[in-house]
Amino acid sequence: MRMTVFGAGGTAGRRVVAEALSRNHDVTAVVRDPARYPGMAAVAGDASNADDVTRLTEGQDVAILATRPAPGREHEAATTTKAVLAGIAPGVRLLVIGGASTLTLPGGGHVMDAPDFPVELQPIAQASAQQLDVCRAETSADWVYLSPAIVLEPGERTGKYRVGGDEALVNAEGWSFISMEDLAVAVLDELEQPRHHRTRFTVGY
């Protein structure tokens, strides 16, 4: 496939690019400043600019939004997603890598509303909720929103994971987590064999 990855220099984006290239896809890796990524064959682009999005997705099969706003600019998660949905070229499928904050817990309630949810993560949690709302309001583009497990960290690529809907996936010990490497595997699996359209799904161990 021909794919465009916005936020290709980020922790998730880099792994998505690597996974896609390992599967012999044609990848356009988009970052704001390619000079900051000398080891990456990247192109300049701004996912918050709908014209840039159109230019960088024309002729592509799929696009991945893997950007994450800097602290203090969390509101950009929603505005950037709006720009991508507005600018994405017709017929191009969009996968948004979002957050876990709006997943429901096995005992009820959302992740972000749990008593032990870190206060310092509330801004990005609220921003992720707004981002999901933006996607759910879109009825034209073929989008899918991927919420990773609650804990997402660099780790091992096992190629194994479980798929869920709106409820956080937890293991036998009650932990909800997935490595960034296996998140990238899940992204490519979904793009190669689409199972979700205009909805949210989650992955975890």
Image: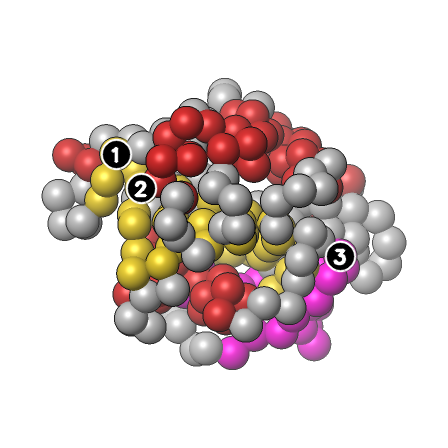
Q: Would you identify the image quadrant in which residue 141 lies?
A: top right
Q: Nearer the viewer, mark 1 or mark 3?
A: 1
Q: Is residue 99 left or right of residue 7?
A: right
Question: Mark 2 and 1 residues: CB-CB less than 8 Å, in contact?
Answer: yes
Question: SS for tag 3?
Answer: loop
Task: Give how far apart the Cα atoms at labels 1 and 3 are.
Answer: 34 Å
Q: Would you identify the image quadrant in which residue 18 lies?
A: bottom left
Report the span colored magenta.
160-181
Disc 1 packing (10 Å; few <14; some 14–19; many ≥20)? some
Question: SS for tag 2?
Answer: strand
Give the residue at x 58% y 67%. Answer: 194
Q: Which residue is mark 3?
A: 166
At label 2, the amino acid type is Val
Residue 34, image x, y percentages? 20, 36
Q: Which residue is mark 1?
A: 44
Name which of mark 3 and mark 2 comes first in the sequence: 2
Question: Mark 1 and 3 residues: CB-CB less than 8 Å, in contact?
Answer: no
Name which of mark 2 and mark 1 comes first in the sequence: 2
Give the residue at x 46% y 50%. Answer: 64
**Image height of 165 relative to 71, above or below:** below
At label 3, the amino acid type is Asp
Residue 16, image x, y percentages? 38, 58
Give the residue at x 50% y 50%. Answer: 92
Disc 3 packing (10 Å; few <14; some 14–19; many ≥20)? some
Residue 30, image x, y percentages? 31, 41
At label 1, the amino acid type is Ala
Question: SS for tag 1?
Answer: strand
